[in-house]
């Protein structure tokens, strides 16, 4: 089984530790992982702004780069959602199947063994594309049996205390290019999310999407509220 | 009309309005009430699906149902009128009122008449209009437009309303008691109701098989007007049609719960025929709806039953306020119906969303709202009317990102692009950094780390 590690462009540039942690978790779980160097981006920023043709160029390139892999795994619900649902990668038998990291682990492996303690109060931010796009958890609007693909991972972290939230799945306000086209609204939404987490005592905010975290952390550092941020892969790697 | 600029209007609301949290607080409260209520309805998701199917079917056969509706209503003694646009609707309503020499009109909530600016039209011709829904009355008295379709004065606080009533109705200064204020408004309107010779309402549902109109209110103000005044007029958008009376058992269960978290609105009234000696008119209004129905990617937006749930749930709406959309119907649904009406005026609205998808999940008739927002962006870009500030970065991005060699050796892509388009990137960076810090740029990218540490080990 050949696994291609897909590292979204902003993670490559700004959050290399998230990619390193993802690689380590996958290797620790026994997978043969390669990071193809020719990869660039998934094309989501273009398509989400209406530039479908531009986005197609980028996602075609993506298909090419990963064509010899059985699986493509990436630590981002948002980019993976785009690749599956908008670029249609994996529809064709020959194409590799694209997975969000934790979905892949839960379907093809076990929750990694975690032994180190993380005695902190932590809030979980479920990114919208992972939640309502990939349906990795139940969204608060729907009347359905509660389910969550990440819960087994969250529950396995030793000594962690997950704080409850007032709004469990409200958007953080990133939204890709929305964050600059509508920056005032975007920041206002971000502040509201931070306040929810902080008022419940969260020292850390964890997410499976670094894009949400980049935005939330940006707002948080500007208002100097002292909250810390980690991608779930980084957190798991820390306690493995 | 001026092109709507959502970001600017929303920023203005956030930074310069008196109560920038009012809209958020009230809308979140309604969303929470809705959640508490729908959880108790067995088969809620099934109900949504059924409603969606009924509406799809009706819209696909709209001509047939409209004709059936007209036939039945006419048989019931109702006068049915057809209006191609807002102006025709206004002319028809004015014609009826003028014929009866009516000095004023009492009007219950109708977003359609807001959309067509009926009040203005009538007042210019000497007929006063009294909005009788409390929220709409507040908005009317303060010479504003609704900020929400179910709660028109949602942007106002109790303090605002107390002040407004003091100025316009001489209520006690500083009295914030909701009951006192409501009673004052009621008393003020009571006399108007009693002497009204014509009443107008909006319509929630038109039933084809019976030729009846159904109107849901909490205040009973529509009924007070209609039952007292000899002339009753109901203005209704074409898309309000449902085939059978029993379909209401689906829609009325969804409407109150989705709108305000009530199991049903206080009054659900069904009007079928004129009262003895009276007249009943129904005005069927197109105003862009049939054109919208012909749009393959967007026609399902006409399923909307105007419950307002997508507004309540939308964090963009709650942050930027209802007025930032520059249209009678704001929020997510407003952002997908406005470009169908006028793509040049409203091309900005489909971009006023983070595409979180909450609207589509909350919508009782399962409109794929965020899917349509995205699709509209594509259409707007294809039209070539998108702002330069949005288009240049995208074209640039696709060039750089589809050529791995560029990307790979760029080191930090931001730095590279910044060199080539200093003005552009700094304006994007400026927008980012107004309320946020930039991410700290690490010493090396993952790619360089991987080349150094992993690739070497492989060999
Ligand atoms: S789009 Fe759906 S949620 Fe929004 S107002 Fe219409 S029916 Fe309600």
Image (cartoon, grey):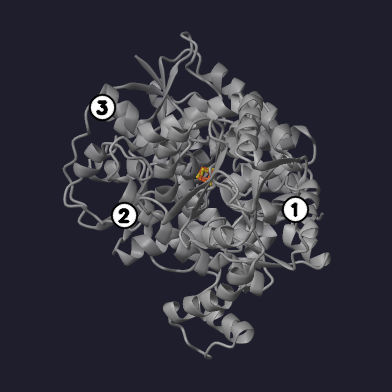
- x and y percentages locating residue B359 in the rendered image: 49, 44
Q: Residues within 10 Å of mark 2 (few under 14, many from 20)?
A: many
Q: Which residue is mark 2?
A: A123
- x and y percentages locating residue B333 in the rendered image: 58, 45
Residue found at the very far front of the displayed protein? B277
Beta carbon at label 2 within 8 Å of ligand 1: no
The answer to whether residue B70 is left or right of residue A138 is: right
Which tag is nearer the camera, tag 3 or tag 1? 1
Q: Which residue is mark 1?
A: B93
**Chain identifier of the residue bearing label 3 in the image:** A
Cα–Cα span, label 2 and label 3: 26 Å
Residue found at the very far bottom of the displayed protein? B173
**Chain identifier of the residue bearing label 2 in the image:** A
Where is the C terminus of chain B found, in terms of image quarters?
top left
Determine if residue B331 is in view: yes
Cα–Cα span, label 3 and label 1: 72 Å
- x and y percentages locating residue B59 in the rendered image: 60, 29
């Amino acid at each position: 089984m050949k696994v291609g590690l897909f590292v979204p462009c902003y993670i490559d540039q700004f959050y290399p530790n998230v990619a390193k942690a993802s690689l380590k978790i996958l290797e620790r779980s026994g997978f043969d992982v390669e990071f193809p160097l020719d990869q660039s981006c998934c094309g989501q920023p273009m398509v989400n702004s209406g530039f479908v043709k531009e986005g197609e160029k980028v996602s075609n390139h993506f298909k090419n780069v990963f064509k010899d892999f059985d699986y493509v795994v990436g630590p981002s619900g948002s980019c993976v959602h785009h690749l599956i649902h908008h670029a249609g990668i994996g529809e064709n038998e020959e194409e590799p199947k694209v997975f969000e990291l934790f979905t892949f682990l839960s379907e093809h492996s076990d929750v990694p063994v975690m032994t180190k303690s993380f005695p902190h109060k932590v809030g979980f931010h479920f990114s919208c594309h992972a939640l309502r796009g990939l349906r990795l958890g139940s969204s608060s609007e729907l009347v359905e049996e509660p389910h969550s693909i990440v819960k087994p991972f969250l529950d396995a972290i030793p000594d962690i205390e997950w704080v409850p939230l007032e709004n469990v799945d409200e958007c953080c306000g990133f939204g890709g290019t929305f964050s600059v086209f509508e920056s005032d609204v975007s920041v206002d939404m971000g502040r509201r999310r931070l306040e929810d987490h902080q008022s419940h005592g969260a020292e850390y905010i964890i997410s499976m999407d670094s894009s949400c975290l980049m935005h939330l952390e940006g707002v948080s550092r500007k208002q100097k509220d002292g909250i810390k941020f980690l991608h779930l892969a980084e957190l798991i790697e820390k306690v493995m | 009309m001026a092109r709507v600029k959502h970001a600017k209007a929303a920023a203005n609301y956030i930074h310069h309005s008196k109560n920038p949290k009012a809209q958020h607080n009230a809308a979140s409260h309604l969303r929470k009430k809705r959640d508490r209520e729908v959880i108790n309805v067995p088969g809620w998701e099934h109900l949504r699906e059924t409603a969606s199917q009924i509406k799809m079917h009706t819209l696909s056969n709209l001509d047939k149902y409209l004709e059936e509706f007209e036939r039945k209503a006419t048989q019931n003694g109702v006068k049915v009128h057809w209006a191609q646009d807002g102006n025709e609707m206004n002319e028809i309503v004015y014609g009826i009122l003028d014929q009866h020499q009516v000095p004023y009109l009492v009007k219950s909530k109708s977003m359609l008449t807001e959309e067509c600016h009926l009040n203005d039209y009538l007042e210019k011709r000497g007929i006063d209009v009294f909005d009788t829904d409390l929220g709409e009355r507040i908005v009317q008295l303060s010479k504003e437009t609704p900020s929400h379709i179910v709660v028109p004065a949602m942007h106002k606080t109790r303090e605002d309303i107390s002040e407004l009533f003091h100025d316009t109705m001489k209520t006690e200064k500083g009295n914030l008691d909701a009951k006192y204020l409501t009673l004052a408004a009621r008393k003020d309107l009571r006399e108007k109701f009693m002497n009204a010779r014509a009443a107008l309402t909006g319509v929630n549902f038109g039933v084809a098989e019976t030729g009846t109109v159904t109107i849901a209110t909490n205040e009973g103000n529509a009924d007070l007007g209609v039952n007292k005044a000899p002339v009753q007029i109901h203005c209704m958008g074409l898309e309000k049609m449902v085939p059978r009376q029993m379909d209401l058992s689906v829609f009325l269960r969804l409407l109150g719960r989705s709108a305000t978290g009530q199991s049903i609105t206080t009054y659900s009234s069904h009007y079928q025929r004129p009262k003895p000696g009276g007249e009943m008119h129904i005005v069927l209004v197109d105003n862009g709806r049939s054109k919208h129905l012909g749009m393959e990617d967007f026609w399902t937006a006409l399923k909307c039953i105007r419950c307002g749930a997508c507004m309540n749930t939308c964090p963009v709406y709650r942050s930027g306020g209802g007025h930032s959309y520059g249209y009678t119907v704001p929020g997510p649904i407003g952002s997908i119906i406005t470009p169908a009406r006028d793509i040049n005026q409203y091309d900005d609205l489909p971009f006023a969303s983070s595409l979180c998808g909450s609207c589509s999940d909350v919508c009782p008739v399962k409109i794929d709202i965020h899917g349509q927002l995205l699709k509209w962006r594509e259409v707007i870009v294809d039209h070539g009317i998108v702002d330069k500030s949005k288009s240049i970065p995208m074209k640039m991005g696709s060039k750089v990102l589809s050529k791995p060699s560029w990307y790979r050796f760029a080191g930090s892509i931001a730095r590279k692009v910044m060199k080539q388009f200093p003005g552009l990137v700094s304006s994007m960076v400026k927008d980012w950094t107004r309320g946020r810090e930039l991410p700290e740029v690490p010493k090396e990218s993952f790619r360089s780390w991987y080349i150094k540490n992993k690739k070497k080990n492989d060999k």
